[in-house]
Amino acid sequence: MTTTIENLSRPPAARPERDQWIHVAPLEELCRRQVMVVRGADRPIAVYAHGPEDAPQVSAVDNRCPHMGFPLHRGTVQNGILTCHWHHARFDLCSGCTFDLFADDVPVYDVETRDGEVYVAAHPRQTDPGERLRRRLREGMEQNISLIQAKSIIGLLKAGVDYREIVRQVALFGLKNSRLVTALPGAQTGSINETNPTVGANLDE
Ligand code: FES
């Protein structure tokens, strides 16, 4: 069976170079096994064949659950939704978006089939990690979930974001929500506010 399966949601310009694809298996074998794990550039990737038998769809995600790292290939897939078997977070296999806010979106990988062989990109689909993690930090604070807050801050620091920017985001969130961060310079005098976020400047002193 020669089937071309591509994720069409990504702009063509973002396609990985040909040498950045990893061979997975013949499509027929992947369909039979439903999920296979391959070694990506820096993490294991779970590659799934799902959907109707006569028109299978191939999707690939980071094999580590973004909640607490459970191997996702040990979860179950139904109607394109992957459920982790530890705390039952659910993810849309095509986009990686989670349905359960205590988890996070799972990174997705481009896939393609050439001459009946399935390939997966070595690196996850390009996104702006800083933007995603800032949104995630805000959600973690809104829901008061310390695990999300901690993972977002660690991710932002790993992505090279200046710690003062993170402190500023946290301080402004506290001010907006009447949770004054009294330990921060300027919080008690009112010199920090949405239009005058001087936290970073104060920390330079
Ligand atoms: S580790 Fe997957 S839901 Fe918790």
Image (tube, rainbow, N blue to C red):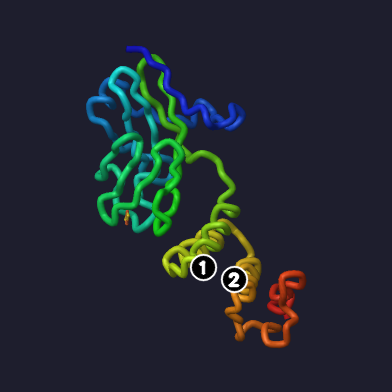
x, y percentage for residue 115? 39, 14
Residue 168 in the image: above or below residue 155: below
Q: Amino acid at mark 1?
A: Met
Q: Secondary structure at mark 1?
A: helix
Q: Is 37 situated above or below 8?
A: below
- Residue pictured at 65% horizontal, 66% vertical: 165
Whether label 1 touches label 2, CB < 8 Å: yes
Return the x and y of residue 204 as percentages of the image width and height.
Answer: 71, 76
Q: Amino acid at mark 2?
A: Val
Q: Quadrant of the N terminus?
A: top left
> Which comes before the other along the chain, label 1 or label 2?
1
The residue wearing badge 1 is 141
- Which residue is the site of mark 2? 170
| Residue nearest the viewer, comparing 121 with 180 | 180
Left or right: where 91 falls relative to 204:
left
Query: What residue is rendered at 75% in x and 81% in y?
Result: 191
Judged left or right of residue 189, residue 137 is: left
Residue at the image position 38 percent from the left and 45 percent from the top: 91
Residue at image location 53% in from the left, 62% down from the top: 137
30 vs 198, left or right, is left
What is the C-alpha distance between the residues marked 1 and 2? 8 Å
Q: Mark 1: few, some, or many residues within 10 Å (few <14, many ≥20)? A: some
Disc 2 CB within 8 Å of nearest ligand 1 atom: no
Ligand 1, by image quadrant, is: bottom left
* Front one among 80 and 45: 80
Crowding near the residue tagged with mark 2, few <14, some 14–19, many ≥20 C-alpha atoms within 10 Å: some
Total tally of numbered discs in the picture: 2
Tell me which corner region of the image, top left, top right, bottom left or bottom right, holds residue 73: top left
Discs 1/2, front: 1
* Disc number for residue 55: none
Point out the image quarter for the C terminus: bottom right
